[in-house]
Image (cartoon, rainbow, N blue to C red):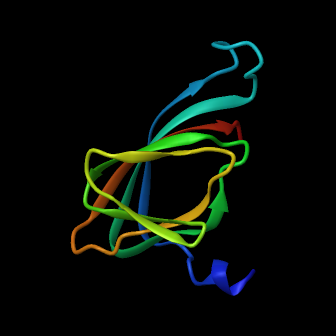
Amino acid sequence: MSDEQASHETRGVTVELLATVDLGPEIDGMAGRHLRMRKVTIAPGGVFGPVHDHKDRPGTVFILQGTITDHRNGIATDYGPGVGWPEDRNTTHWLENRGAITAIEISVDIVRQI
């Protein structure tokens, strides 16, 4: 594991699975894939890492509360309530809560069935 990855290990994060849909019966060619919705809570000072990509796992994020800093390509971008971002095959990033209040996001993605 590189120093970059080690310095961004997950801490202060809880993840709650809200819903899943088996996409195989719904859409031809999607056997073995699920649409997943999660609520991710990041405490002040918390990190959602390590650095990871979204190849074969596209999704979107919507911020409900607080501010989440998204780190990708050496750029830190702050997102507050009511906004979010896409996570596509070109996304490689890690997240943190630099704020004083708990940040909450809703994350929806397509994952392979485990």
User: 16 or 92, which is in the foreground?
Assistant: 92
Quadrant placement of the C terminus = top right
Q: Is residue 96 above or below residue 87?
A: below
Quadrant placement of the N terminus = bottom right
Q: In which quarter of the view is residue 82 placed?
A: top left
- Residue 78 on image: x %, y %: 36, 63
- Residue 112 on image: x %, y %: 71, 38
For residue 49, side relative to residue 18 (left or right): right
Q: Residue at x 49, y 41 (%)?
A: 60
Q: Is residue 96 above or below residue 29?
A: below
For residue 33, side relative to residue 47 (left or right): right
Q: In which quarter of the view is residue 101 placed?
A: bottom left
- Please give the count of numbered marks on the rendered protein: 0
For residue 101, side relative to residue 11 (left or right): left
Farthest residue, direction bottom:
3
- Residue 113 on image: x %, y %: 70, 36
Q: In which quarter of the view is residue 88 placed?
A: top right
Q: Residue at x 65, y 39 (%)?
A: 111
Q: Residue at x 63, y 53 (%)?
A: 91
Q: Residue at x 36, y 51 (%)?
A: 105
